[in-house]
Amino acid sequence: MHEFEQFVNDGPLLDTPEGFLPFLERHIFNCIEAEVDILEHYCRDPQVVVLTRHMASFGASIVHERRAVPLVTVFAFAAQASAFNLWTDFFRAVLADRVNSIRGTFGLSPVTDWRAWLTSSDLFLACWPDWFSPRRASWPHGVRHLGFLQNDEIESGQVPTSVGRMLDSSPSPVLITGGTSVWRMAKQFYSVAAAACEAIHRPAILVCRHEPLISSPIPPGIICCRELPFASVMPSSPWCKSRFVNQNF
């Protein structure tokens, strides 16, 4: 829990280029040796494929090279793919010396072509459908769209009565959520989104499990929930019905 709190408290470091390296030093680079040890233990099985999230794949990339195991990198959201060129430039300008130093401790030669190294995964997966954010020339070659990820066992369930009534009303409500993330602008995001819905007289459902991020009082016409079964809520939306049901998604 203490490490998680430190991770969250250091989140604002990621909002500036100058803070990115200190964040990585505190929470990523110091874990690489242990990460590599764990991965290489499991990579003794020849059937293993290493799956990693983009921007958190340092240890996975090292194991990919050392053990020649297949590596699949996942883009969790579209902005990660869209900013891939920026990520490459950031590596070249800011992280190159530090990453090459870490690579040296594992007997790997320095990287000179950062674009080639960052696109060396055997496969890239995008966690959204093609229509939401189509592939661009700046993306790594061969990105495959998975569609939006959904766990029906967790996200399906009974919709609260108050939310159900709002979903059946007109106009349909706006869904406001930043997921489970805690970031520097989160409180302002929820506050501004709620105020905007109040200004246009639009009902809204605000979903956030972190109470300190919710400003009070909550504007009238807005229901605040700690969590919701999104798989049950979203099909009730007219937009979702026309977008997904009619196209058999």
Image (cartoon, grey):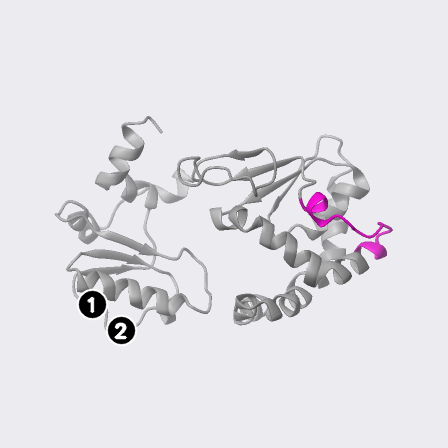
Q: Is residue 107 left or right of residue 244?
A: right
Q: Residue furthest front?
A: 137
Residue under the image location 25 percent in, 40 percent down = 239
Q: Is residue 143 left or right of residue 187?
A: right
- Residue 133 tag number: none
Q: Is residue 45 left or right of residue 192?
A: right
Q: Is residue 111 magenta?
A: yes
Whole-percent x and y of residue 212?
38, 71
Whole-percent x and y of residue 241?
25, 35
Which residue is label 1 attached to? 219
**At numbered mark 1, what does the secondary structure look like: helix, strand or loop?**
loop
Looking at the figure, which quarter contains the N terminus? Answer: bottom right
Q: Is residue 13 magenta?
A: no
The span shown in magenta is: 103-118
**At numbered mark 2, what does the secondary structure look like: helix, strand or loop?**
loop
Q: Give the vertical position of 147 relative to 117 (above or below).
A: above
Disc 2/disc 1 C-alpha distance (Å)? 8 Å
Residue under the image location 31 percent in, 43 percent down = 157
- Tell me if residue 41 can be seen: no
Q: Residue furthest right?
A: 107
* Crowd band around label 1 with a 10 angstrom C-alpha radius: few (<14), some (14–19), many (20+): some
Q: In the image shown, does 135 or 108 lie closer to the viewer?
A: 135
Whole-percent x and y of residue 205?
25, 56
Which residue is label 2 attached to? 216
Residue under the image location 16 percent in, 65 percent down = 220
Q: Quadrant of residue 125?
A: top right
What amino acid type should be assigned to the residue bearing mark 2? Answer: Ser
Whole-percent x and y of residue 118?
68, 46
What amino acid type should be assigned to the residue bearing mark 1? Answer: Pro
Residue under the image location 55 percent in, 68 percent down = 16
Q: Give the vertical position of 213 relative to 175 (above or below).
A: below
Q: In the image shown, does 2 or 67 lie closer to the viewer?
A: 67
